[in-house]
Image: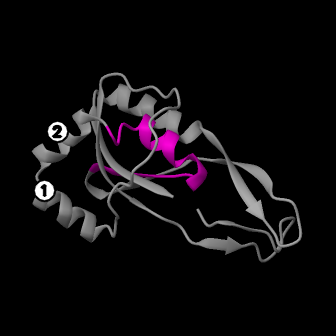
């Protein structure tokens, strides 16, 4: 899954926040017919797009906690999106091929550094499943992050 957002604030505070995102490890569920599911640890992947847009990739099983930690649900985020403009946001979402932010649980979160920054949530993107063609996990299927 991909969470797409813009972030602004004091540069060294933004950098510290982005480092926290990149350093986080997630369990990735892998399954294979006739075998017990396994989990491997994968690192969150942070991609930089033009115009200050960031895309954070992580397993869908962690969606609730990631979107909650990024404040995709907060009144502040809604206020910032409204300031940005509904038409601009819709065009940006269309151009980036994003989907609207889904409903998610807000009871748990990660402890990432979020001081003196503001996040403008743009949308999400889902991944297809991928079956490993070779290597130690040959034949195992997982989310193709």
> Can you say whether 76 is above or below 96 in the image?
above
> Can you say whether 94 is above or below 82 in the image?
below
Residue at label 1? 86
Q: Secondary structure at mark 1?
A: helix
Q: Residue 84, position in %: x, y?
A: 13, 48
Residue situated furthest bottom in the rendering: 133
> Can you say whether 68 is above or below 101 in the image?
above
Left or right for 107, reference 36 = left
Which residue is rendered at x = 32% and y = 30% of the image?
Answer: 11
Q: Earlier in the sequence, mark 2 or mark 1?
A: 2
Residue 134 shown in magenta: no
Question: Tag count in the figure?
Answer: 2
Cα–Cα gap, marks 2 and 1: 11 Å
**Depth check, front residue: 143 or 105:** 105
Q: Quadrant of the C terminus?
A: bottom right
Which label is found at residue 79?
A: 2
Which residue is rendered at x = 25% and y = 70% of the image?
Answer: 94
Residue 69 shown in magenta: yes
Left or right for 70, reference 110 = left
> Can you say whether 49 is above or below 77 in the image?
below
Q: Residue 7, position in %: x, y?
A: 30, 40
Which label is found at residue 21?
A: none
Q: Residue 40, position in %: x, y?
A: 76, 51
Which residue is rendered at x = 46% and y = 41% of the image?
Answer: 105
Q: Residue 12, position in %: x, y?
A: 37, 26
Q: Residues within 10 Å of mark 2 (few under 14, many from 20)?
A: few
Q: Are marks 2 and 1 in contact (CB under 8 Å)?
A: no
The range drawn in magenta is 52-73
């Amino acid at each position: 899954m991909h969470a797409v957002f813009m972030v602004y604030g004091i540069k060294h505070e933004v950098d510290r926040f982005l480092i926290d995102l990149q350093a986080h490890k997630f369990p990735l569920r892998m399954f294979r017919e006739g075998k017990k599911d396994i989990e491997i640890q994968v690192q969150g992947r942070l991609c930089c797009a033009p115009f200050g847009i960031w895309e954070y990739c992580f397993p869908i099983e962690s969606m609730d906690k990631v979107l909650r930690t990024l404040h995709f649900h907060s009144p502040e985020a809604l206020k910032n999106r409204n300031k940005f403009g509904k038409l601009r946001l819709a065009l940006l979402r269309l151009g980036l091929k994003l989907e609207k932010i889904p409903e998610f649980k807000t009871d748990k979160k990660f402890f990432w550094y979020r001081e003196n920054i503001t996040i403008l949530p743009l949308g999400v993107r889902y991944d297809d499943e991928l079956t490993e063609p070779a290597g130690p996990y040959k034949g195992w299927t997982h989310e193709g992050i």
